[in-house]
Every structure is written in structure tokens, then in C-alpha cells.
Image (cartoon, grey):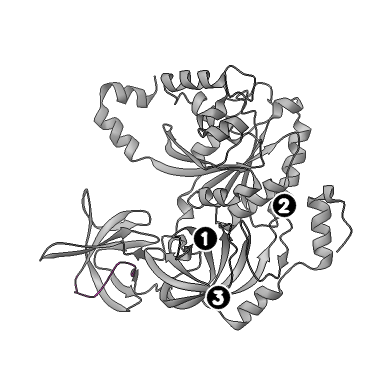
Amino acid sequence: MSTEQALLENDIEEYLKVHENKDMLRFLTCGNVDDGKSTLIGRLLHDSKLIFEDHLDAIKNDSKKFNTTNEEFDLALLVDGLQSEREQGITIDVAYRYFATEKRKFIIADCPGHEQYTRNMATGASNCDLAIVMIDARYGVQTQTKRHSYIASLLGIKHIIVAVNKMDLVEYSQDEYRKIKTEYREFAEQINLNDIRFVPISALKGDNVVNRSETMDWYPGATLMGLLDTVKIDSDKNFEDFRFPVQYVTRPNLDFRGFCGTIAGGVINIGDVITALPSGKSSSVKAIVTADGELDSAHVGQAVTITLNDEIDVSRGDVIVRSNKLATVSDKFVATIVWMSDAAMQPGKEYELKIGTKNTYGRIDDINYRINVNTLEHIQEDEMKLNEIASCNIATNSPVVIDGYDKVEGTGSFVIIDRLTNVTVGAGMITHTSVDGDVVEEARQYSPTEVELNAFIRKNFPEWNCKPV
């Protein structure tokens, strides 16, 4: 009997306390179509014994109608719940699942592999700490594998687990595994992916997912579940630059005026000198209040209410920062945008922008270049279409508080909303906090040379069999 099971039977309050204090890992599965993403998540849940019996019985019944594996039941049905997904045997929308082990809690985002659903993959990846990149051992690194890996890198995901799946279909060949490992590492070097772990698995058979594989004794590393349990993510958070986007101002009585929100970066202590942006007014922290009582300090990720020693004007959308670590206040910046609408984006059109808790209006002045995620080439364009990624110059109608996305994600990212339909049409990550002439010119001119581009195409896309550009 595990420690958690013993607590659950004998001391429910202690069990809940232990569970509440576990750290959280958010991860997604991505990769090419039919690489086994949904089946992997089903196997994780099944072998971890985290599926209720009635749910398992329902899946077995559904497997008689929707079964793509010829097994007793189709594990993919645990996450592919839409009727159209089950009929086609594909993932269309992002599906979230929650589970926990004795070491930590998990939120899984199962993302679609089809190119036309790239925007869904980007949405699922936006809040993740880690990505599991699935690769079919029979086909190796595919175009969509590279596309999803690039988007993961673009969104600042620092930890990658490459799961080489369907090893049972290549007779558990170590040579095939090594070949794929070498091929992916060569591509990853070009997109700044550093922390990469590899594991050979069979999601269908359960090899190296939760339990070690007896047929792949040549693999000395941890299982996939072992890697998820032990990967360290604490150092990923920015504890230096305090950023507190104000979500709500609470005034329950005449003696209390607090500013509510979730800390996007850094640490704050009682007595720290702060500045409210964009106004620039300063004060100091009087109290840090939570639902469980007052704290002496709080850090990134915590939802708190802050009170100040001075009555300064702070409203929803403002950002409280420490006075010795100011953010940038600007109405012009450069961002990488993922376009998510069927209607093309046209420079000059006014959109609503949501940056942190701030809603403002703005426009895309120029497209510096579009990024071909297959070749990483920079292409000059006048508009953006669905699922395209581009570097753009943004101008807002009023100054906003921003940081670079690589510094603080909460104040370095935004969504673009169509003013007429109220539909989210794009997502952006700020790369430069001002539109400097030299920066723009560098961005426009930077692209691979012909020699570099030809070498990249020959190495990564030999199936194109194309002539040099």
C-alpha cells in the first residue's frame, strides 16, 4: 500500500493537505497526425490506475464501435471525446486531463496533429511547462514534428521529451531509435531547444510509459512517467522582476482598499517600495492578503490582494512593479504573432488587444517578415493568413505596460480580438519593447543565405527533391 493510499484510508485531512502542496506540471502532447498522442495519454492514465471502473467500462463499450487499434479497448477514446474525433480517429480540439502521482500533480493538453489545427496546438501550448513531442518510429521526424517543435520553442517551453512511439512496429530496434534521436537533435539545435530527453515507447503495448519495457533492455533511462515526475521546473520562473497586473480593486469597507490579481513575475514583501504603471506613482506594501490569511511575502503564480500605505490611483489593467525593477511603458513594440482567424490579417486595421489584464485598441502597422516554420526562412508578406506566424510592428492607442516575452510571459504576451465579432483572431509574444529603426531593419533583413537555406532543405526535407533556390 502506498503512502497516499494509507493517508486516504486513515487521515483524509492530511491526505488533502499533502495533495494541495504538491507542485503542478502542465504539459502537452504534440507531433504529426497518428503518432499516438491520444493513445499515450490513455496509457498514462490506465497504467497509473487513474481511471474509474465505470469510465473504463464505457470506453470498452465505445471501442466496439470506434476502435482503431484492434485491441480490447481503444485508449485514445479516453481523450478523443467528440463524435467527429471518434469517427475519424483523429484529434481536432485540445482536450485537457488532470491526474496526480505521489510526487506531483499534472494537467495534460492533448493537441491535434493536423496542420489546419495548428492554432489549437498553439493555444494548448501557451500555458505549458513541458512538451512531449511524439514521433512514429516507422517514419522518423516529419514536417509537422518540426512545426510543433518550433512553436513550442517560440512559446518559451524549456523542457522537451521526445517520445519515439510505436517501437513495437520496428521490432524494438535500437538502431532506428538512435537514428531518430540524431535527426531530431540536429533540427533542435537550429531552434534553441536545449533540455531534451528521449525515450523509446510503445503507447499501445505500454512499453516504457509507466512500466519499464522488458523488450527494450538496451534503454537505460527512466520511463516517460519517471521523467515527468522528476523534471525540474522551479528555475523556469522569473523571481527577479516583480509584475502584478491588477485584475480587480476591492473596497469592502472604508478602511480597506486592496488590489487583486495573480503575480506574473518576481517576489514581493511587506514594506517593499512599489510603483504603479503607467501612472508612475509610488508607495510601499502594507499587507499581502490571501484567502488563507496574511503573508509576509508572495511570489510568481500566487493569487493575492495587496494593500498600500498610500492612497494612490490604481485601476484594473495597471501593473504594480518594484520601484528598482521597472517595466517598459510604450505604445509601440515588436511582436511575433500567430494568426488564428480564417480572415486574413491586414496591416492598419484596428483590433482590440488584451495584454495581461489591460484591454486597449491598436493596430498592426507593418509585417516585418513571415516565418516559414518548415524551413525557418523569413519571407516578405503584406498580410497574414490562418496559422501563419510573423514578426510585426504593433501600435496601441494608449501606452501599455510590457516586457519581453522571454523575460515575463504575463506582461510579454497578448491576444488580438476582432472588434466586430469579439472573436480572438491572433496571439502575440513581444520580442522588442520598442520599435527602433535599427531593430526593424535588422529584423527585415535577417534571413538565411541561399547556401544555408539549401543545406537546411536538403538535410531536413529530402523528400522535396527540389532544385537549389
Tell whether 348 sits left or right of 451: left
In the image shown, does 314 or 395 lie closer to the viewer? 395
Q: Marks 2 and 3, Cα distance to the nearest angstrom?
A: 36 Å
In terms of secondary structure, where does tag 1 sit? Answer: strand
Q: Is residue 312 magenta?
A: yes
Magenta stretch: dominant SS? Answer: loop
Name which residue lies at 66% across and 35% down: 34
Crowding around mark 1 (Cα neighbors within 10 Å: few <14, some 14 to 19, many 20+) is: many
Crowding around mark 2 (Cα neighbors within 10 Å: few <14, some 14 to 19, many 20+) is: some
In the image shown, does 168 or 416 lie closer to the viewer? 416
Q: Marks 1 and 3, Cα distance to the nearest angstrom?
A: 17 Å
Give the number of the mark in front: 1 or 3: 3
Name which residue lies at 68% across and 52% down: 188
2 or 3: tag closer to the N-terminus: 2
Three-letter code for the amino acid on which mark 2 is drawn: Phe
User: Do residues under tags 1 and 3 come within 8 Å of each other at their CB atoms?
Assistant: no
Q: Which residues are magenta?
A: 309-318
Numbered mark located on residue 427 in the image: 1
Give x and y (percent) for residue 447.
73, 69
Give the number of the mark in front: 2 or 1: 1
Q: To which residue does mark 2 refer?
A: 187
Q: To which residue does mark 3 refer?
A: 348
For residue 225, above or below residue 155: above
2 or 1: tag closer to the N-terminus: 2
